[in-house]
Image: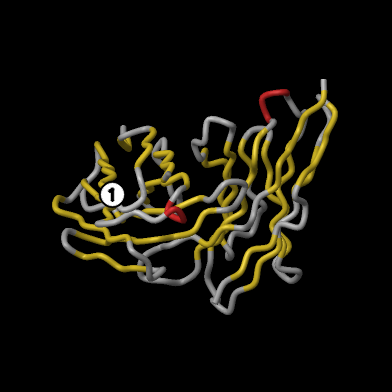
Amino acid sequence: SQTIHQWPATLVQPVGSPLSLECTVEGTSNPNLYWYRQAAGRGLQLLFYSVGIGQISSEVPQNLSASRPQDRQFILSSKKLLLSDSGFYLCAWTPGNEQFFGPGTRLTVL
Amino acid sequence: AQKITQTQPGMFVQEKEAVTLDCTYDTSDPSYGLFWYKQPSSGEMIFLIYQGSYDQQNATEGRYSLNFQKARKSANLVISASQLGDSAMYFCAMRGHNAGNMLTFGGGTRLMVKP
């Protein structure tokens, strides 16, 4: 069966510090992968998606970036975090019609 | 552009009763998919049900059913026999005809089940 992992589960970072969030998928190959962000009490906003290794599409211009160094690995990064980057970050993958989400990373920027 | 609207920020329902969560959408794509997700306080997004725009019958999954009215562009979620564990945020989402199969989400509805 397929499984999606995210780490870390929670993260507290100072403003201006770098960020690296990792997402990996098991049990499938060449999945479409997605990064979403959810502000407190709000819906999900798509940040990036990838249809293959090295292929990244950005939906929202910001100080975040994404990379896909391996087929089942998707990384969200920032060189300098802003207060507005705080939120709940969810990775997702799609085998077909459905889209399944990882457990999420709760990021607090202080 | 696609848009999903959930007009109920919060809903109460008595345990064991049915509840309908509203969702309307707007798209120019002839083919699309509609989704409902549940998000409990733990934060995980749990896939509940999917409806394709060309599906002839309304989707059902256990206690969940999707009341799909294409002409009205609505895709309401019906939860029958509510349980205390159904208390959560519920999100409606849509996928249009795009290369990345991305989802557009509504703002969510918080459902609270009363004992």
Please indicate, yes or no, whether residue B103 appears anywhere in the rendered image. Answer: yes
Q: Residue at x 51, y 50 (%)?
A: A38
Residue type for callout 1: Ser
Query: Considering depth in this image, is A94 or B66 the residue closer to the camera?
Result: A94
Residue B7, located in which quarter of the rendered image?
bottom right
Give coordinates of residue A75: x percent, y percent.
Answer: 25, 50
Q: Residues within 10 Å of mark 1 (few under 14, many from 20)?
A: few
Residue drawn at (78%, 45%), measured in percent from left and top? B20
Q: In the displayed structure, would residue B37 be above or below residue A59?
A: above
The image shows residue B32 at horizontal and vertical percentages of: 53, 66
Q: Is residue A2 visible?
A: no
Q: Provide the secondary structure element on which disc 1 rests.
A: loop
Q: Tell me: residue A75, above or below residue A8.
A: below
Above or below residue A83? Residue B13 is: above
Which residue occupies 40% across, 69% down?
A59
The residue pinned by badge 1 equals A17
B17 left or right, relative to A10: right
